[in-house]
Amino acid sequence: MSPVYLLVFVLFLVGVFGLLTRRNLIKLIISVAVIEAAVNLFLVLAGYRQGGIAPIMTEQHPEVEAFAARAVDPFPQAMVLTSIVIGLSLLALMVGISLRLYHIYGTYDLDEIRRAAREEGR
């Protein structure tokens, strides 16, 4: 296994650790963003090829088989672009919900929000 994949796994574990141990909404949002970055990096690495060329057919590459053997896989790159857009909208939604919760309860601490919601009967 390449050391880069190990670093991606460590980055993913850091995000999961933050998600499981933190009670602050902002820290949870940051943990989700770290996990998303780790998954995107893994997808980019999955399509990487040592000495690869861009997957664009030109007159410089007349032989399709030789070109396909050296070209980088474009599918993971397209998946990462889609994932970035979805992740950005998810991040905006999480920030919007956390701001609304802060305006209602005056804190980002999940335990205090749950306690206040129970007292109010929600």
Image: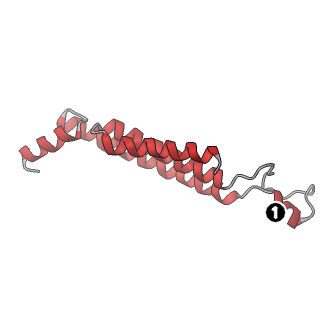
Q: Would you say residue 104 is visible in this rendering?
A: yes
Residue farthest to the top? Answer: 106
Q: Give the total of numbered labels.
A: 1
List x then y, in percent, for residue 115. Answer: 12, 42
Q: Describe the colour scheme in one phrase.
A: secondary structure
Name the residue located 78 percent from the left edge and 52 percent from the top edge: 54
Q: Which residue is labeled 1 in the image? A: 68
User: Residue, x 80% and y 56% (percent of image)?
Assistant: 56
- Residue 55 place in picture, x, y as percent: 78, 56
Q: Residue at x 50, y 42 (%)?
A: 11
Position of residue 82 in the picture relative to residue 23 (left or right): right
Can residue 92 be seen here? Answer: no
Residue sitting nearer the eye, 106 or 66: 66
Crowding at label 1, few (<14), some or many (≥20) Cα neighbours within 10 Å? some
Q: Nearer the viewer, residue 17 or 88?
A: 17
Query: Looking at the image, which residue sits at the far front?
Result: 1
Q: Nearer the viewer, residue 30 or 78?
A: 30
Q: Position of residue 84 (x, y in %)?
A: 54, 48
Q: Residue at x 81, y 63 (%)?
A: 68
